[in-house]
Amino acid sequence: MYLYTNDIIHQGGCIVRFDRPYLFDGAFGTYYFSKTGNEAPCELANLTAPQTVLDIHREYIASGCDALKTNTFAANPVSISDSVRLNEIIAAGWSLAQRAAQESGARVFADIGGICADTAEMDYLTIVRNFLDLGAHDFLFETLASYQDVRPAVDLIRQSVPDAMVIVSFAVSQDGYSRRGLYCRTLFDQAESDPCVDAVGLNCSCGPSHMRSLLRALGQRVKPVVAMPNAGYPSSLNGRVFFEDNADYFAQQLAALYMDGADILGGCCGTTPQHIRRAAAALAAAAARPEGAGWPEPLAAPATGADAPGGGRPGLLHKEIAVELDPPFDYDCSFVLAAASELRACGVDLITVTDSPLSRTRADSLMTAAKIRREAGIEVMPHISCRDKNHIALRAGLLGAAFEGINRALIVTGDPPMQAGTRGSDGVYHLSSFDLIAWIHSMNNEVFADAPFLIGGALNVNAVNFGVELARAKKKLSLGASMLFTQPIFSDEAVDNFLYARQELKDCRLFAGILPVAGYKNALFLINEVSGIEIPDTVVRSLEGKTPDEAAAISVAYSAGIMQRVYDAADGFYIMTPLKKVNIVRGLIEEIRRYEQ
C-alpha cells in the first residue's frame, strides 16, 4: 500500500493506523452555491468558472487540510451523457486541484461520487480510466450506497498503480442504512474484506453526532476509519435550503471522532473552509490518542435466513400449508378473520396477506396481518411490495409488525399502478425486491437481532425464460431470502420448472403455488388480466357451463393432481384463495391430507 506521510504506521505493506489525524477538505457543491448562487452542477464550473474552483481549493488549503478532493463528485456518465464533455470536466477538475495543491504540498484525491444506475459498474470503470490516464494516484469513492459495483474499479486502480491510496466511504442515514437498504456494518465488512481498499468510512447523509454514534456501534475495525460528516442538518426558509453556521461545534465533534478512533476526517455537505480551519485547530489541540484507543468490540451478529431457527427445510411428517387471503377494500374485516379462523381449524399453518394486488387499494397488509394473528390465533406472513412506500414508511411498517410479533415477510415488487402518471397515483419503487430483501436481511443483524424476520421471495415458474427467473431467485437467496413462493402451477411446463428449481435451490424452503380457480369466468379473468398466470385451455374449457359446485369439484381435483406431482419436491404449498371461496381451499386441503395418509 502507499506510504504517503510519516504519520502513517505500516506493517507488512498495509496501513494499520495513523499517528495523527489526517484531514481532508470540506464540501464543494454547497460551498460553491453559497459563494455564487449558481444552482448548476458545480462540476461544470471546472470549464465555465475555473478561477472560482481554484479559489475554493486554495481556501481549503489555507484552512489547514492535508488532502484535497477534485471537483468531480458527480462527473459521471449518468449525470453527463456527453462522453467528450465528461472527459473535459474530469481533466479540468484534476488540473485545477493539482495547481492548488502544488502551492502547498497537499495531496490530491480523485473524487468519485456514488452512482445509482444499472450501468454503475461500467461507469465507475470509465471514470477511473480517465483519472488514471491523467496520472491520478490516490482515489476517494464517496457517498456510496453499496460496494459491489465499485469493486472492479478498485481492482483496476490496484493493478495500474500498486501503491495507490484507495479510500471507500459510504453514505447512510441516521439509522445506519444506505439508499440500497444495506446496513453500515455490512458495507464496512464488504469493503474491508477487499485487500485493494486502504481505508473505509462514512460521509454525508448525517451530521457529526449521529455519525459518531454509528461508528461507535460498529465496533473495532480492521482498517483505518474515515469520518466526513455533514455540517449538520439543513434548514429551510422561504424555499431556500441552508446549513447553520456551526463551525465550532463541528470542530469539537471531529476531534471527538478522532479520539474515538477515526483516522481520516473531513467535511461533507454544508461544511466550509471555516469548518475545516476550526477542525484543524481542534485536532491540533486534542490530546494524543492513547495507544490502543478505538471503537468498542461489536456484538456477534445473530443467525438469520437458513441458519435461523425455523429458517431451514423442515422435517415435517406432512407438508406445511400457507393460504393467501386478501385484505378488505373497506373497514369490514369480518370475512378475513372468519376465514383465517376456519383455515386454522382445518390445519393451515400460515396465512399470507396480500399487499393491494393489481394496485387496487385494500387495507394495509401489515395491519391486517397483525389483526389476524391477534384475533384468529394463527401465524401470518404479510406481503410487502416495493410499489407504494419509501424507506421511511417501509421501516416504520416493519417496526410496527415486530411489535405485533410478526417475523415473516413475503417481498414482492408490486403490480404497477393502473393510473400511472396521474397525480398521486404513481408508484414509488425506491427499492427493487432485491434491495428490499437485502435491507431487511441487514436489519436482522441490528434492529431485529432478537427476533429476525424470515424473508420470502417470489418465483415465477411460468416465466418464458425460466433460466433468467431462476437466476433472479438465486440472487434473492444470496441477499437474505430463505423461502420462495411460486406463482400458481397449472401446466406441465410449470411443473417441470418447479422440479428443476428444486434441484437448483437446495438450501431454501420452496412452496408450490396452487390456485384452485373458482369457475370459468374467474379462469378467463386470470389468464387475460393477471400477469404471470398460465392456465391450460383444457382446464378452462372443462369449467365452461358448470355450476359453482361442479366447477369447485373440477378445480379441486385438478389442483390436487398438481400438488401430488410436485409433492416430494415441495417443502410446502402456497394456496391462493379464489374469490373468497374458502370452501374450495378447505376441500383442497382435505384432498392433500388424504394423499399424505
Image (spheres, rainbow, N blue to C red):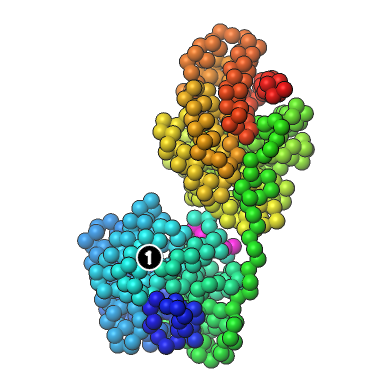
Is residue 582 visible in the rendered image? The answer is no
Residue 300 lies, in percent from the top left, at 64, 63
User: Where is 180 relative to 545, above or below?
Assistant: below
In the rendered view, does 542 fall on the left or right side of 588? Answer: left
Over which residues does the magenta segment extend? 175-179
Identify the image quadrant of the C terminus. Answer: top right
Residue 432 lies, in percent from the top left, at 48, 47
In the rendered view, does 373 fall on the left or right side of 392? Answer: right
Q: Identify the residue at horizontal 49%, vertical 78% (top origin).
A: 16
Residue 584 lies, in percent from the top left, at 66, 20
Is residue 529 on the magenta stretch? Answer: no
Closer to the camera in the image, 24 or 368: 24
Badge 1 marks a residue whose secondary structure is helix
Q: Identify the residue at horizontal 71%, vertical 42% (top origin).
A: 370
Image label count:
1
Q: Identify the residue at horizontal 60%, vertical 56% (top origin).
A: 443
Q: Identify the residue at horizontal 51%, vertical 60% (top origin).
A: 178
Mark 1 is on which residue type? Val
Residue placed under numbered mark 1 in the picture: 154
